[in-house]
Image (cartoon, grey):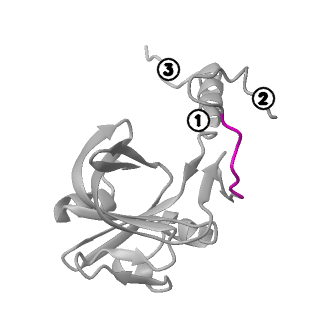
Amino acid sequence: MTVDQRPSTKQNARRRALQAAAARLTTGVTLLTAAHEDTVHGATVSAASLVSRGPLIVAAGLRTGSTLTRLAVASGQFAVNVLSERQSLIADWFANPARPAGHKQFALIDWEPDPATGLPLLRSALSVLICRVHGHVGAGDHELLLGEVVDGTVGVGGPLLSFAGALHGAELRDVIRGRAGTSPCTTTLD
């Protein structure tokens, strides 16, 4: 007798509901780049975040066994290109598994190699962080690539965001904030 190992309809519905809830985590969209020997690679990542301020360490979630992780670990470095709201086509391009490999994937992109590392850097990125690999660890069907920020630049513009399974621009405006130690229920709009 065989036992059916497929998830039930109820389990599938629960998984879809949890995925929809998790998709509400609003994140900035980045292009991670790596270079090793004569190979360069880029990958769109919507799961990158600063995880330490001393030293500055970023973490990025990548598919387990990804080319980007392999090249970054081999070279000991990678770049985080923070995409602006005008760069959604770049995000889509580097998320496309059918794009060409190596230098050809950068053929129509406005980029330059970092003079010190050879890492591909977008000329019009919102910011660029050059990172030395601090480590990588498995996390479910992904890996977290950790990098210590060793250099960077700042551009201009608004961020490209991932929210509810789609890319968005955002009009940034200050919000009302309470003083430290005050309850959100007692903050007034006066």
Q: Which residue is mark 1?
A: 22
Residue 98 lies, in percent from the top left, at 48, 69
Q: Which residue is mark 3?
A: 4
Q: Secondary structure at mark 3?
A: loop
Q: Residue at x 69, y 57 (%)?
A: 170
In the image, 188: left or right of 77? right
The kind of residue tagged 1 is Ala
Tell me which segment is drawn in magenta.
Answer: 171-177
Label 1 and label 2: CA atoms lie apart by 31 Å
Q: Nearer the viewer, mark 2 or mark 3?
A: 2
State whether residue 113 is above or below residue 34: below
Asked if the residue under mark 3 is in contact with the one under mark 2, i.e. CB atoms within 8 Å, the reply is no
- Tell which of 21 and 134 is nearer to you: 134
Q: Which residue is mark 2?
A: 188
Q: Residue at x 27, y 41 (%)?
A: 137
In the picture, the quarter occupied by the C terminus is top right
Q: Is residue 169 something that shows in the picture? A: yes
Residue 128 lies, in percent from the top left, at 41, 67
Choose top left, top right, bottom left or bottom right for residue 152.
bottom left
Residue 172 is inside the magenta segment: yes
In the picture, the quarter occupied by the N terminus is top left
